Image (cartoon, rainbow, N blue to C red):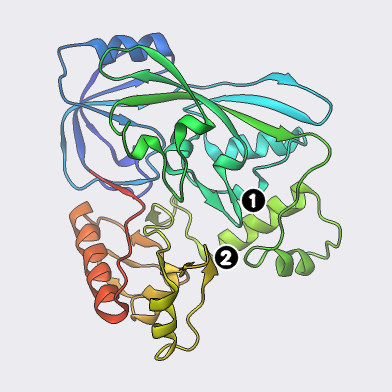
Amino acid sequence: MHIEQNTSLKPYNTFGIDVKAKHFVSISNVSELKKVLNSSNYPNKLLLGGGSNMLLTKDFDGLVIHLNLKGIAVISEDHNHVFVKAAAGENWHEFVLWCLANNYGGIENMSLIPGNVGTAPIQNIGAYGVELKDVFVSCETVSIENQTEKVFDKKDCNFGYRNSIFKQEEKGKRVITSVTFKLTKEKHLLNTNYGAITSQLNEMGVNTPSIQDISKAVIAIRQSKLPDPKDIGNSGSFFKNPVISKTLFESLKDNFEDIPSYPVSDAEVKVPAGWLIEKAGFKGKRFGAYGVHKKQALVLVNYGNAKGEDILKLSKLIQKTIFRLFNIHIEAEVNLL
């Protein structure tokens, strides 16, 4: 375990923002994590996983701890289910591919979501009708304050839409070191009704899809809409889809007949933030080195050497405009640092 000085965080965030950490360390096991968390030499600490769900706006005057915990293992199984534990530092999409190679089903709809396994429960990541909570069993954690270990089960996590206890009461208090999933082995529950999956499968000539086919369809859809962070810096969807009252939705329909929605409850609907942003005229709009992606209005991008504060300023302009036009507040999905 080697602590570096004045390290650029550009390789460690998918936005590709070039800020520096005064101190930096990459840890590969829980013992190292506990040791560095317990160190009084660095009172100001920042935990960093895949760097896919954050916008860095300034240098960090402290110690950045890069969670590089690796390992995937089957811990138990029965006739139709398998329990798989993955370490926090495993790349999420690589983990999905590992499961598919073993014919384990349940997370194929979440293919190609950027980030690492350890940050997945924090956001309760989801895509195309499936969320992490649908396959989540538990996660192992370490206390930042006193390094005690604690296991959180699904009920403990209090999952909501892109939300969990780790974004609320436990925010900044615990580090997730591994996650255990319950996946199917044979009787896979296929979800092809959300978004363009069915039409993509038809285009692929697939009538009876496997979980591998669904993954390929999702990957094709995402690649057609979303930029690869290796090519253009981004964090995927920057904003959450807002949930609004049916009363507000009906009043908006008077002026915007084509406004789409998805039912949430008898009194509420979810409106696609991407539609709102596109309707407001931001889709494809570029401001020098940064802007809104031309194919997906939910994605803010760094075209080269943008600063984090530039992208933050753009996000606030979008929020202000959406509220003015639609009386809807859209919330950032990424963490701002």
Q: Please tell me how crowded label 2 is: few (under 14), some (14-19), or many (20+) other residues with Cα within 10 Å.
A: few
Q: CA distance from mark 2 to mark 1?
A: 16 Å
The x and y percentages for residue 133 are 56, 40
Indicate the quadrant containing the C terminus: top left, top right, bottom left or bottom right.
top left
- Placement of 109 over or under 25, stated as above or below: below
The amino acid at mark 2 is Ser
The x and y percentages for residue 28 are 43, 17
Indicate the quadrant containing the N terminus: top left, top right, bottom left or bottom right.
top left
Left/right of residue 143 with respect to residue 313 in the rendered view? right
The x and y percentages for residue 302 are 32, 58
Mark 1: which secondary structure? helix
Query: Which residue corresponds to the image point at 69% horizontal and 58% vertical from the top-left?
Result: 217
Q: Quadrant of residue 36?
A: top left
Q: Which mark is residue 109?
A: 1
The amino acid at mark 1 is Asn
Q: Which residue is mark 2?
A: 224
- Placement of 159 over or under 240, stated as above or below: above
Query: Which residue corresponds to the image point at 43% horizontal and 55% vertical from the top-left?
Result: 236
Q: Which mark is residue 325?
A: none
Query: Which residue corresponds to the image point at 63% horizontal and 39% vertical from the top-left?
Result: 96
Q: Please tell me how crowded label 1 is: few (under 14), some (14-19), or many (20+) other residues with Cα within 10 Å.
A: many
Q: How many marks?
A: 2
